[in-house]
Image: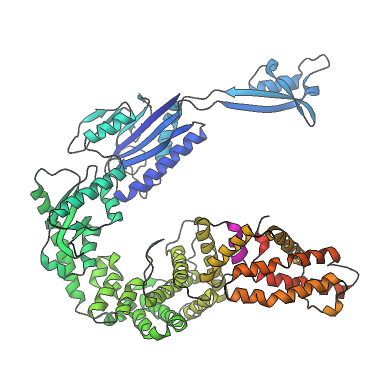
Amino acid sequence: MVAEFLLEIGTEEIPSGYLADGLKALRQFAQGCLEENRIEIAGGIYSFGTPRRLVLIGKAIAERQEDLVHEVTGPPKNVAYDKEGRPTKAAIGFATRQGIAVEELTCIETPKGEYLFAKTKIPGRPTRDILAEALPQILSKIPWPKSMRWGAINTLFVRPVHWVLAIINGEVIPFEFGGVQTGNVTWGHRFMAPDPVQIYSVQGYFQAMKESFVLVDQKEREEVAQKAAGLAASAVGGVPVEDVELTATVANLVEYPSAVCGDFDKEFLNLPDPVLITVMKKHQRYFAVYDSDLRLMPNFVAINNTVARDESVVKKGHERVLRARLSDAAFFFREDLKRPLAERIEDLKGVIYQADLGTSFAKIQRSGGLAEYLAQLFIPEKIEDVKTASLLCKCDLVTHMVTEFPELQGVMGKEYARMEGYPEEVCNAVHEHYLPERAGGVLPSSAVGAVLGLADRMDTITGCFAVGLIPTGNTDPFALRRHALAIVHILEERGWDLSLTAFIDKAVSILGGDVRFDADRVSKGVLEFFRERFRNMLIRSGYESDPIEAVISVSFDRICGLRRRIDQLKKFASESAEFQTLTLTFKRVSNILKKQQQSFDVSPVLFREDCETSLWDAYQTVKDDVYNCMENARYFDAYNLLAGLRRPVDEFFDGVEVLTKSDDQLRQNRVGLLQNLSGLFLGVADFSKFSV
């Protein structure tokens, strides 16, 4: 028999940013609990939520947990029974420990002979009883950003609990949480349907919630909010800005979305578009409105939690609040325009970037020098733009606008630089050096922005490593992991053949002028940090670990070619009939060379067997071609050339004793031959990393 269960925790308003992760954890914990308790889940576990309720639903789950069968082997039969076949103390004790009568014991045949065997069954408990015990613990484990206690209740939870609905097949699951006893009653929308409603099934719950003006499904609320916003904006001939993040936020602020379109004074349109959009989005959760030419209109759309009785009253309230915000922004904007960006460079000396790494002024000096280094390599014709952008890129941090709206850093710098007449690429770079802002985000569109972003991030990473701010576990306060991946993505997207080692060393060298540290330790640590980030990035995107390790363990310097090199190795491994035997051959070479501390030269005059000459000739024949293929990124061809060495290597091993003890000179010559061969292989990939 299968069952369905429903849990709803009614609370005071939960912050919108908490809901998604909290509901995900609730679902995962519940599913894990059922699986651990041997309760079959045929229909799935689902979580939903609004600002006032967390909902967990289990569909087609077993009414009882599976029976637990214990199978235990006991003492040998000849010890368990005497000559007359009567059970001894050993048999009686074994049966007692298993909780069964001695007559229920059986014997099984093992490689060591006959042994006693006990098979016991523990009947499964009802799912209702297990949920009654587990659900309070599951709810207590949800990792909210902040939790609270209230009144005399000892429960720690995201917000005070007002009711707990918990049923399975219509029957109440009895437990207490947050000082509230479970029942089969819920409440509808606080303002439009505040009366209690009795619930007997999952289907009945969803129907009752809709009738009570509560859309429990977050995705449904998002769709309703989008449609309502579009309809409201169309009344003034506009369309709301498409913003997935804002839509998700407003959907988690309400239980029944409705929309109203308001106005603001046209004079505020003199503010840069990003300012208007940010004020509306970040501070009021309003959607900006565009006309058919994608120009901002003096309108906005607000999402409400109720259907307004008098829309004009609601509209005026929103307009009054937004007007005050826009007036503040206009004042800050006018004040900022009184001083050009370049005058603010000195102000950065009063802004502490990090206690041990100095001020923001010191940071732009370091990253500026690093950016010039990159510009000389890749865009020497734009080096003056790079110098200018590196000086201006942090100046907006000390403007009134960014002080009030920190999310506009870079954006305001770009706007102010443009208004002051700087070259367009300089203006864009001031903003784009922050890109990408998140994993999978937009990359810099300009070369100057890319150079500046690379330099700024590398200075951050090397600086943090120098003063011991290295990410550990889940702690990464300076987002170094994200910065490292951003550098990788920019280099790959640009195709810039940059030596990562030289880049790190340059950053460390410049940093040494401001901070004292062990330069060699930091350089090695940062390079290994990048290697680990690159490895994890590829594994998360579906790459197998063996080809990744085979490449990055021997070469991790030119980022932009690594992915292609790994792809072609993967192709070679899947298509070449020689791959497995070649890998085994290389592992054999590696094992022989593991204990060799010294390098030896090769003298062909010391060869005694034809197989030595054949291997040396084969090596000499392909060596230059392999190196040429690697230099020209023809990695697949290089792998195939190495495959041609497999036969002469195998013949060499069959024909000679490499580590002969009879002649030191002969042994060293053969080891030297294998060392040359291994060096050629390792210039391409470490085949020993493959598990074949």
- State how many labels appear: 0
Res. 111 image quadrant: top right
The image position of residue 394, as x and y in percent, is: 33, 75
Quadrant that contains the C terminus: bottom right
The residue shown at (27%, 79%) is 341
Residue 181 makes an appearance in the image: no
Q: Is residue 550 magenta?
A: yes
Q: Is residue 609 above or below residue 32?
A: below
Q: Is residue 501 above or below residue 192?
A: below
The image position of residue 309, as x and y in percent, is: 10, 43
Position of residue 488 in the picture relative to residue 666 (left or right) = left
- In terms of depth relative to the viewer, which is nearer, 366 or 589? 589
View extreme (right): residue: 662
| Segment colored magenta | 543-555
Residue 322 makes an appearance in the image: yes
Quadrant that contains the N terminus: top left
- In terms of depth relative to the viewer, which is nearer, 400 or 586? 586
The residue shown at (38%, 78%) is 364
The image position of residue 496, as x and y in percent, is: 48, 75
* Prevailing secondary structure of the magenta residues: helix
Position of residue 558 in the picture relative to residue 375 (left or right) = right
Res. 445 image quadrant: bottom left
The residue shown at (73%, 21%) is 91
Q: Is residue 269 above or below residue 67?
A: below
